[in-house]
Image: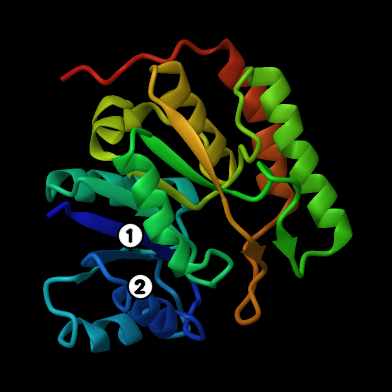
Amino acid sequence: MDRKVVIIPTYNEKENIEKIIRAVFALEGEYHILVIEDGSPDGTAAIVKGMQEEFAGRLHMIERTGKLGLGTAYITGFKWSVEHGYDYIFEMDADFSHNPNDLPELYQACKQGADLAIGSRYCKGISVINWPIGRVIMSYYASVYVRTVLGMKIYDTTAGFKCYRRQVLETIDLDKVKMKGYGFQIEMKYSAYKLGFKVQEVPIIFVDRTEGTSKMSSGIFGEAFWGVLNLKMRKIKPRTR
């Protein structure tokens, strides 16, 4: 059986974390979860620890000393997942903006030939619920900007709901990934694309969080805007073994 792990970064997600863990484990197909916990003062880590006995061997957690950024959280999770022999590695938010029921769709896309499957808000029009119109426009046109500058035929370039085949994460030089916020999502897609991997978008409906606090900021968009220009100039090389 394929080994699958869902990486969920957390910071102050006490309202959501138990529900999202149970939703993933309710799926057929034996998914594992790795929580990357960035020192949440609200007790998120304690909730996960309290569930680890119930889900022994399936629920894992790495605790870090503070809020170190989305990109570094995922890179930590990627390295752990590769070292532990997982075949398919997922990214997913803790706040239910990504529907756990879409995980099997991403998995099937990779099983059927994709190296990286993206849960896409924009490949079939705009599929976003509960966002202010200004944020929808900003996000949509950010993806248009990235697609134009980098030449990738990907509609949702900033998406954070994804499934990787292990080979992709073994090939990308994770230590050379520079962007930390949502620009990280762009950089990982571009790296996979430039290294010749097959990238496929799977349409999803994105629903903004109803509990907890958004981590979005203008600085995140600023990093992505300038980072894309720098990315265009860089040569992406595979990791040397």
The amino acid sitting under disc 2 is Val
Disc 2: CA contacts within 10 A as few (<14), some (14-19) or many (>=20) = some
Residue tagged 2:
24
Q: Position of residue 179 (x, y in %)?
A: 52, 36
On screen, residue 175 above or below 8: above
Quadrant including the C terminus: top left
On screen, residue 231 above or below 74: above
Is residue 8 rendered to the left or right of residue 160? left
In the rendering, which numbered label is found on residue 117?
none
Q: Position of residue 138 (x, y in %)?
A: 81, 46
SS label for mark 1: strand
Q: Position of residue 172 (x, y in %)?
A: 33, 27
Is residue 3 rendered to the left or right of residue 8? left
- How are the colours assigned in the image? rainbow
Q: Is residue 33 visible?
A: yes
Q: Position of residue 110 (x, y in %)?
A: 34, 41
The one of 110 and 15 positioned closer to us in this rendering: 110
The one of 238 and 27 positioned closer to us in this rendering: 27
The amino acid sitting under disc 1 is Val
Q: Is residue 178 visible?
A: no
Is residue 134 rendered to the left or right of residue 191? right
Earlier along the polypeptide chain: callout 2 or callout 1? 1
**The furthest residue to the right:** 134
Residues at circles 2 and 1 in contact by the CB criterion of under 8 Å: yes
Front of the two marks 2 and 1: 2
SS label for mark 2: helix
Question: Residue at 61% of width from left, 25% of height from top?
Answer: 153
Cα distance, mark 2 to mark 1?
Answer: 8 Å
Disc 1: CA contacts within 10 A as few (<14), some (14-19) or many (>=20) = many
Residue tagged 1:
6
**The furthest residue to the front:** 112
Question: Residue at 21% of width from left, 17% of height from top?
Answer: 240
